[in-house]
Amino acid sequence: MKNFVLISFIFLTATSYSQPAERIQSRAEYIELYKDEAIREMLVNGIPASITLAQGILESDNGNSALAKYANNHFGIKCHNGWNGPTFYQDDDTADECFRKYYSAYRSYKDHSEFLRTRTRYAFLFNYKASDYKNWAKGLKKAGYATNPKYANLLIKLIEDNNLSQYDKVRKMPSIDKKAKQKEVKTIEKIPEKEPKPLVQFHENKIKFVIAKHGDSYYKIAKENEMGLWQIMKYNEREKDQKPKAGDIVYLQPKKNKSKKDIHSARKGETMWEISQIYGVKLEKLCQYNNKKADYRPFTSEQIYLRKQ
């Protein structure tokens, strides 16, 4: 019996030494790997690169968490109602919570931007400058992104300790290293060969919508949702020669006459139509409330009324 125990101990010891521990990715490696993606998302969507990186670092433990490794989910975004993509379950605030699963970390970064851009509770954040990471961090906590009461302070400390604010100053779109990106993309089990159709979501203004992907057309979206093209064009106030851009909100129901929110502070380059899409308000009504024409471009920080005053 003693010999058996001794042999078992030697075998287990040898086995443990023959299987080296999985390598842990450093914070510096994580930043180097994803800083360009954070910059791209900032230049396209207006979210500070420092905030995106800090959230990625914090939520994914520098890319080492199970959620990041096995689901490519770097921002802890849960499934929420209507998510029809791949899923990953793990304990969080409660047992076996549903999290989104992505084809690659890059898709997680893009979905993070879409998540903040399309939910009205985060709309006020886009009134802050891309260099104002402190207000962004505090705003994310205020809007309920995380339950940790120290969430804002944790983000700010990560940004300042790692000089992430330097990336907020970049104004040139980084080039895409296709080989590196292809290498990073991981195969995930049970993911269908074809991407799922756009996720149908429910706007705060009580309207169903989807987010357009790269290569989408209004015809394709109409077909995927078993609707007539004329309905999509009418609900979104578009003309025949116009096409959706990746990230655009596309409504599957008519927009409303007013928003729950009273006023919107216009961002640089924003159009009246874009504002009407953000809040789900008919363009005609929006123009009436502000005594403007449909082709009017508000100046930066101009107050746009979203309902009759």
Image: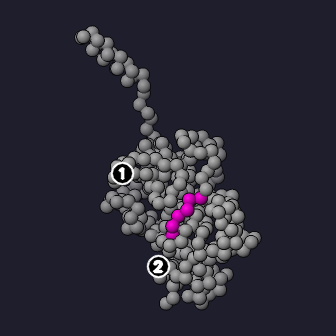
Disc 2 element: loop
Does any portion of residue 100 appear in the rendered image?
yes
Q: What residue type is labelled 1?
A: Asp
Q: Which residue is pictured at 64% across the width and 50% down the height?
A: 176
Instruction: Tell me which numbered mark, 2 or 1, is placed earlier along the sequence.
Output: 1
Residue 9 position, x and y percent, is 30, 17
Q: Is residue 106 covered in magenta?
A: no
Dot 1: few (<14), some (14–19), or many (≥20) neighbours within 10 Å? few
The furthest residue to the left? 2
Q: Which quadrant is the N terminus positioned in?
A: top left
User: Disc 2, disc 1: CB below 8 Å?
Assistant: no
The answer for how far apart the CA atoms under marks 2 and 1 are is: 31 Å
Q: Name the residue under label 2.
A: 260
Q: Mark 1 points at which residue?
A: 92
Picture quarter containing residue 157? bottom left
Residue that appears at 60% across and 53% down: 196
Query: Is any atom of residue 125 visible in this view?
Result: no
- Count of numbered labels shown in the rendering: 2
Span of residues in magenta:
198-203
Q: Position of residue 78 (x, y in %)?
A: 44, 55
Amino acid type at circle 2 is Lys
Q: Give the quarter of the image for residue 222.
A: bottom right
Query: Which residue is at 64% across, 52% downward?
Result: 175
Q: Residue at x 59, y 72 (%)?
A: 253
Out of 150 and 274, give the one closest to the viewer: 274
